[in-house]
Amino acid sequence: MTRVSIREYAVTDGAGGPYAVTTAPDGALWFTMVHSGRIGRLVPGEAPASHQLDPACGPTIIAAGPDGALWFTEYRAHRIGRITTDGTVDEFPLPTTDCGPFGIAAGPDGALWFAETAADRIGRITTDGRVSEFPLPATGAFPSAITAGVDGGMWFTMHQANAIGRIGMDGRIAVHPLPTAAAGPVGITAGPDGAVWFVEIAAGQVGRVGPDGRITEWPLPDRGGRPHAITTGGDGNLWFTEWAGNRVGVLTTGGAVETYDLPTPRCEPHGITLGPDGALWIALETGSLARVAA
């Protein structure tokens, strides 16, 4: 087993709820605090800072935008938020009420694309706040996470429909059902091999979908580990969190997997990103960010 070093950094109290984390152009880690309605910032080696939003808005996923700002979803307030690196916040209401925006990612067209979990839609917002919505060819699909593929499309998980979707810049949508029934796909990321990789929280598997739609799945050692988020590491492997297993795992593109226990029991690992320092960083809902270095 490859040796890794894991260290946790407290960024809020236990009620704050760090949920997602991303690396920004300013060389800092930015993260959401879903329970306290804040956006946090951490430069490795410095003290954390945070910016208060509406405490009940439920900020969830955060991503770096093409405009140098950070963009995030407000799951409970049904808005898209934007925060500059100096802390200026703008919020954009969405056309569909009670749509539950969750995943968000920058697209190849200079806009941000996001998933509306409760409305069966994929949304698009320009950097000046103009919103378009695209209905899915399914009801109750619960689209969740979204990522830009190397093929020029946006790929997303359809948690309840048990499928991976793709939307092109022309709005056309393709749906790829998963081989495993009731797998519950959640996190998704562009891989180092031109494919898209995702985790199946209900099946305890990592999946891969190629540009041609072909899907391959790898069972994890603990099928009850509840894998939640996934990202590509600086080593060219896929790194993922296991929410119930209290672990971080790594999978090579050839399917070899290793997992590592996190130091704090029941720390609720969620989002994961490649940090500005080349390490992997994980948002722990109990109040910390964990740094994982191989």
Image (cartoon, rainbow, N blue to C red):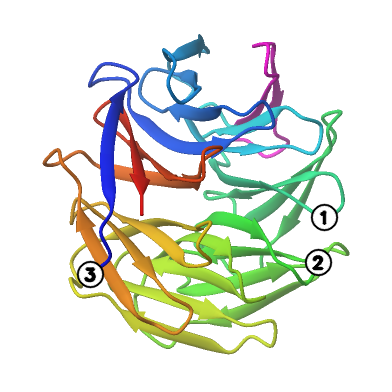
The residue where tag 1 is placed is 108
Counting residues from the start of the chain, the first of labels 2 and 3 encountered is: 3
Identify which amino acid the numbered label 1 is placed on.
Answer: Pro
Q: Mark 1 falls on what kind of element?
A: loop
The x, y position of residue 268, in whole percent, is 24, 42
Image side of residue 148 versus residue 38, left or right: right
Dot 3 alpha-carbon crowd within 10 angstroms: few under 14, some 14 to 19, many 20 or more: few
The x, y position of residue 53, in whole percent, is 53, 13
Q: Judge whether residue 137 can be spotted in this image.
A: no
Residue at left 39%, top 82%?
A: 255
Counting residues from the start of the chain, the first of labels 2 and 1 encountered is: 1
Between 27 and 190, the one lying in front of the other is 27
Image side of residue 143 versus residue 110, left or right: left
Residue at left 18%, top 67%?
A: 224
* Label 2 to label 3: alpha-carbon separation: 36 Å
Between 247 and 142, the one lying in front of the other is 247
The x, y position of residue 180, in whole percent, is 37, 84
Identify which amino acid the numbered label 3 is placed on.
Answer: Met
Identify which amino acid the numbered label 2 is placed on.
Answer: Gly
Contact, CB < 8 Å: mark 1 with mark 3? no
Q: What segment is highlighted magenta in the picture?
A: 79-97
* Label 1 to label 3: alpha-carbon separation: 37 Å
Residue 81 part of the magenta segment: yes
Contact, CB < 8 Å: mark 2 with mark 1? yes
The residue where tag 3 is placed is 1
Residue 133, relative to residue 183: is it above or below? above
